[in-house]
Image (cartoon, coloured by chain):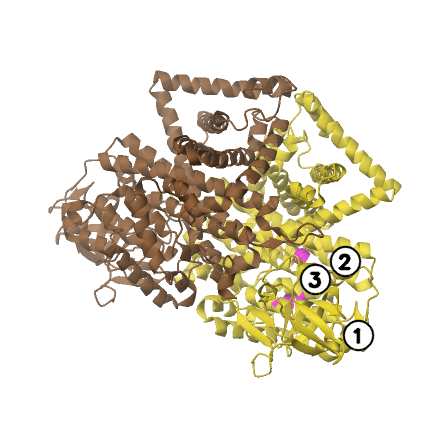
Chain colours: A yellow, B brown
Amino acid sequence: MGMETSGLREYLDGPYKAARDVVRAGLEANPELLDFAVTLPTDEYRDKVLELLQQITAEGHPARGFPKEYGGEGDLGGFIAGFETLAFGDLSLMVKAGVQFGLFAGAILHLGTERHHERYLADAVSGRLLGCFAMTETGHGSNVQALGTTATYDASTGEFVVHTPTPSARKDYIGNAARHGRMAAVFAQLVVGGETHGVHCLLVPIRADDGTAMPGVTLTDCGPKLGLNGVDNGRIVFDQVRVPREALLDRYAQIDAEGNYKSEIENPDRRFFTMLGTLVQGRVSVGGAAINASKVALAIAIRYGDQRRQFGAPGSAEEALLLDYRMHQRRLLPLLARTYALHFAQAELVDEFVRIFGDGSSEHDRRALEAQAAGTKALGTWHATETIQTCREACGGAGYLAENRLATLKADTDVFTTFEGDNTVLLQLVAKGLLTDYRESFGKLDPLGTARFIAAQAVEIAVEKAALRPLVERLRDVVPNRSGDSADPDAGLRDDGYHSGMLRFREEHMLAGVARRLKAGIDAGDEPFEVFNRCQDHVIAAGRAHVDRVVLEAFQAAVADAPEEIRQLLKDVCDLHALATIEAERAWYLEHGRLSPGRSKAITALVNELCAVVRPAAVELVDAFGIPGSAVEVPMVVPSQHE
Amino acid sequence: MGMETSGLREYLDGPYKAARDVVRAGLEANPELLDFAVTLPTDEYRDKVLELLQQITAEGHPARGFPKEYGGEGDLGGFIAGFETLAFGDLSLMVKAGVQFGLFAGAILHLGTERHHERYLADAVSGRLLGCFAMTETGHGSNVQALGTTATYDASTGEFVVHTPTPSARKDYIGNAARHGRMAAVFAQLVVGGETHGVHCLLVPIRADDGTAMPGVTLTDCGPKLGLNGVDNGRIVFDQVRVPREALLDRYAQIDAEGNYKSEIENPDRRFFTMLGTLVQGRVSVGGAAINASKVALAIAIRYGDQRRQFGAPGSAEEALLLDYRMHQRRLLPLLARTYALHFAQAELVDEFVRIFGDGSSEHDRRALEAQAAGTKALGTWHATETIQTCREACGGAGYLAENRLATLKADTDVFTTFEGDNTVLLQLVAKGLLTDYRESFGKLDPLGTARFIAAQAVEIAVEKAALRPLVERLRDVVPNRSGDSADPDAGLRDDGYHSGMLRFREEHMLAGVARRLKAGIDAGDEPFEVFNRCQDHVIAAGRAHVDRVVLEAFQAAVADAPEEIRQLLKDVCDLHALATIEAERAWYLEHGRLSPGRSKAITALVNELCAVVRPAAVELVDAFGIPGSAVEVPMVVPSQHE
């Protein structure tokens, strides 16, 4: 990491630099962990990961995020930043830490009350009490409300009976379950006096200190996975397992000794979503981790492309560097730009998370945060899959060897797109939230909201109608700074307002379109599920359009706030991101009369040009991520060490 | 595999049904091999793969492809079909077979002469002599002409001295090198009397019968890889290794005892490409294998989507099947359709391969075959990566477990996009071939070619110019069966001629555009490499457009030839493929005035509709691939076996 990148690196590290640096130092001190995924038998690898996990607790990373009264520092932002930084190292360690501190300890903290905190939290945060987060079942992943596991209250003994009634209600893919976990936070249908109150969470011991399963608990290993084999994912089956009444994490619903159920939240749906909402930290963290894993892959592939030569001008003495080829730039640099965009969007999300979980806040704020977390997680994890794949291909056969790390990164991150919420389901959640806002602002006849709604509709109708007018005339209307035939089709293409305006237009137009289609279907008397299903691809695209806009605007704000010495470079990268995003969606813009063919081609040409502008700074841009050397100085990048 | 699919299956199997069935039976008899990738230590896995390799030689699969005089059957088409079928099983076995029979024995057959055939071929084909194909070096992959290894003729002893002059000339990623190979077909710069004659191939013993390296040969292991760990890829360094003059595979160039070099092909470039061209079988085979690996992933994911329920109409007793969701159909069914398209394109390629290698043929034919093989390999392998990734995500957490096979498929096939020719380089090769045809037909003033060239130019200029005319008027010109404003935007959308016309237009327009840009750059006096590099993304897109069209037309021809009882189903699948392809490229069509916004949206709507049309036949369509049950009946699809 050269000195010249320090301004950029400091700016990327932001307010949580110290938390990041603690984890960086820990990773740098344990470079051998990066090899264990391929050199150790599974159980030894898992035990090594556990050892490292306990070491990072000693260094204070997880405690940082918990309340001071349980040995923590109450620094939520630093906690998440530290977790993200773990993604620069072995991802099994990161996921194991996420299970233990984020999910298991997080469930105790957010869903439990003082007695649970007093009794378990310090041990969970210190890693003395290893736990599972037993939500997913073989038959139910995303549809958590339909879980099959039951926790039936037996008033005669004051106990809950936890049970797996069918094979499909088996808890599945549960981290820490196959080998290390002693206790599980189990999500189950709460049944009291014959009445079901929906999904609640209870703490259930699953393994004795000697490692054997508790009576009535069957623990099995999920076996080898594509990646993350340092995490002991397993299956849990409960056969009438009894736990005391106090095992219920009862922040949002309580049962008294007589077996009376009560909750301050009467509506069962709202209660369920409130409980689930406290677990948003998991999604915030996974999104950040995925973005950081992309950084590692790009750092490796871009350094390789800056060293490796292939073909070249006939007759020239030397072959050309891979990264000087247009196609190579095209493959890697827009992904680098999007990584920067997502980095800043993630930083904004973490700030918002800290604000909302720190100060308490309105339910509306919390729903908005959940949607933002869901959207950033979906885009961040798909981005990681695409980026790491592209980097692997851009490094050819060398990229396929484990020693060059891209293989492990690829295998380990692959599941991110479907765990902590399947991405397609998450984008539906984003879109549904926005549509609810829509309906609310319209329903409540809030004057500003209604006005915006109507104005947006008017604009889009105008643009649609314009489809039959000559192109040149339409362009004069919709493209700023453009007049008449002879104007430069590049005019305004690097304008921030043009970029965000394009993305906002798309978002609003798609949302309005979905709203209209849904309403028309319902008005026509069609079955609501059918109406929704007909529009499902449109709903998901609208969710994505929203997140695209939020991500771009986060990057633009970060450019505006940047120190002067790095602002122009960041602006170039931001423009590359903005225009590559518009280019990727140019079919939609062309269909909706918002781009002329000429301007669409001009955008493609400008993306090429911006790739060439950014290329000389490419290595500096990846160095600024501050990835520990052991993670990126792989043999193909530093070949002299291996020959 | 139900009876109802037999018509479809027979049609897919085509003329090489017997060769496929032999391999199917072999795989079905050895289901345990599918587990070895995750259950065995690397060396044991490798040895098991070797054992199976020798078993399939006993069953006659590889011999099928070799001349009768060396124990074979001379059935090239059956040989490739059998190889493709190996992709239904463990892919390490398939790749190991490819290295041994396709590459090593293939080099002896195609580049050697009778004495090499007599001495080695029967042993290579029977698997008694295990060999390597030592082409790629650490510093040179795609640019084979720049290899660094030297083979210098020493006239005083009548020997070649094979040597690795620099670390970057080390042979790398060589299958069979780390453990099993005894001999290598080594590609090296041939130096005779101080003069370099370019890359030639020699047979060099690398390992003694006791498994130790031969004197002067250093063999190391490439170590763990993302996948294919049943293949022992290694590195070879030669330190002045002496082999007799007869070691040169001398079909295209000979050295006499006095050290005089001669070749019937005087131009060194032409000689090089002629030698390389004989190895086209590797690319043909890898493309077919990738397409078959996609079939396995689709068979698993589609069966899962047809069984697994999630969410559903509020209040309904049962959740909905995944495959009844629009988004799920959208993700999987166009990929299924493209798999069918690629299957028929591959069958056509194999027919052409058999024709050209069977009868002898013109150099022009061989170049055309090489381009077709390169293009099918590029599209087929990228398709596999995309399809298997999508299938994994569509199966959520279950898809991440090794027991459900998608993880292994993903890891094993990932390298296909970069081995046997990096896909981006291959598409350049395709485009360059077409541009050469262009130049030739123009240069030779062949009247028909020139006329077509000029006509194509005229059409495209007309379309470009039309950009300023009102849309509605342009559409009347370019869209068949459409007149005036009120016409149905769906008109003709399921017309074969419309589909292929659209793809042909795109191909020709892009090629002409690239040709014009290249010519303009050269005419302006710019450095040719720079001119090329500026257009590189355009060149690659043109190559892809060509292959897209070839693939579609192969599918259309297969529909036309299909037995009547399956023709309508295939036509639906073909239309889905055609329209999804046009949809994916609709930005380009909109930019070039070849789609109106309304028609573009109509295509999207029709793709959705065709997904729903094909959905009821989805399981039948994957059953028709005839994949052995052990390969697709994974726990998540047959859960009762595991609960």
The residue singled out by tag 1 in the image is A259
Q: Does residue B72 appear to the left or right of A370 in the view shown?
A: left
Q: Are marks 2 and 1 on the same chain?
A: yes
Looking at numbered disc 3 in the image, what kind of residue is underneath it? Gln
Task: State whether discs 3 and 2 lie on one chain.
Answer: yes
Query: Which residue is pictured at 47% across the width and 36% down the height?
Result: B569
Q: Nearer the viewer, mark 2 or mark 1?
A: 1
Q: Is residue B173 visible?
A: no
Q: Disc 3: which chain?
A: A
Residue at x 83% of width, y 59% of height: A361
Q: Which residue corresponds to mark 2? A: A269
How far, Cα to Cα, is label 3 from label 2? 20 Å
Is residue A264 shown in magenta? no
Q: Nearer the viewer, mark 1 or mark 3?
A: 1
Say which amino acid is labelled 1: Gly
Q: Nearer the viewer, mark 3 or mark 2?
A: 2
Mark 2 nearby-residue class (10 Å; few <14, some 14–19, many ≥20): some
Q: Is residue B88 above or below residue A533?
A: below
Question: Does residue B286 sit above or below B58 in this rendering?
Answer: above
Region in magenta: A10-23
Residue A281's disc is 3
